[in-house]
Amino acid sequence: MRRPEEVFVVVYRRAAPGYEFLVLERSPERQGYWHLVAGALDAAEDEATAAARELREETGLDASVADADLHYRYSLADEPPEVRARFSPEVTDIAVTAFTAEAPISWEPELNDEHVGYRWCEAEDAVALLLYPEPQDAVEQVSQRLVGSA
């Protein structure tokens, strides 16, 4: 059974006049929605290690990840049966920790088989593409921090 803990990574790069954010289109076999780099923690893995691993596996980017100090929970109640079946029956919700990673300006991802497409978007467009409220919030929060620190 999978651990009830996941990570996602808000990948961004500098672009005129601000920043672009990477959104990935999941394959039809994986429900076909737009999402961030994301995944579950392996058995003995901590969150930062999982985030860096997922970033490499899903995009080919080997970069340091930073804890975004954003933590979420989502309920399994509305997930399809094949998703709920990955967890022990007593698990009702999943804890998610968000990270950030800066990509080089000209870098483009090399997608694994979990994804069929990607886009670089301004924060507003990324949020509009993302299906779930947790990654939407993470992009908004990270975007505000980046603009505030510029």
Image: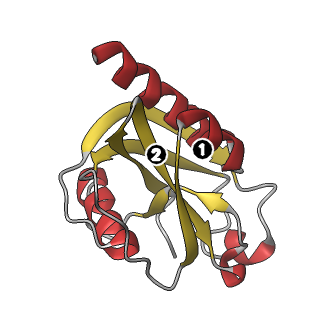
Q: Nearer the viewer, residue 113 or 134?
A: 113
Q: Type of residue at label 2?
A: Phe
Q: Residue at x 28, y 58 (%)?
A: 106
Residue 50 visible in the shown view: yes
Q: Nearer the viewer, residue 90 or 145?
A: 145
26 lies above or below 17? below
Q: Type of residue at label 1?
A: Ala
122 lies above or below 33? above
Mark 2 and mark 1 in contact (Cβ < 8 Å)? yes
Marked residue nearer the N-terminal end (1 or 2): 2
Q: Residue at x 70, y 64 (%)?
A: 33
Residue 42 visible in the shown view: no
Image coordinates for residue 54, horizontal then vertical, percent: 35, 66
Q: Which residue is mark 2?
A: 21
Quadrant location of the C terminus in the rendered image? top left
Tell me how far mark 1 sits from mark 2, CA to CA: 7 Å
Q: Residue at x 57, y 72 (%)?
A: 117
Image coordinates for residue 47, horizontal then vertical, percent: 31, 52
Asked which secondary structure carries label 1, the reply is: helix
Residue 86: image quadrant is bottom right
Asked which secondary structure carries label 2, the reply is: strand
Image coordinates for residue 79, horizontal then vertical, percent: 77, 62
Determine the residue located farthest toward the front in the rendered image.
Answer: 16
Q: Residue at x 69, y 71 (%)?
A: 83
Instruction: Give the left or right position of residue 11, taking residue 6 as reference.
Output: left
Circle 1 residues within 10 Å: few <14, some 14–19, many ≥20: many
Circle 2 residues within 10 Å: few <14, some 14–19, many ≥20: many
Q: Which residue is mark 1?
A: 126
Instruction: Give the left or right position of residue 62, taking residue 96 as reference.
Output: left
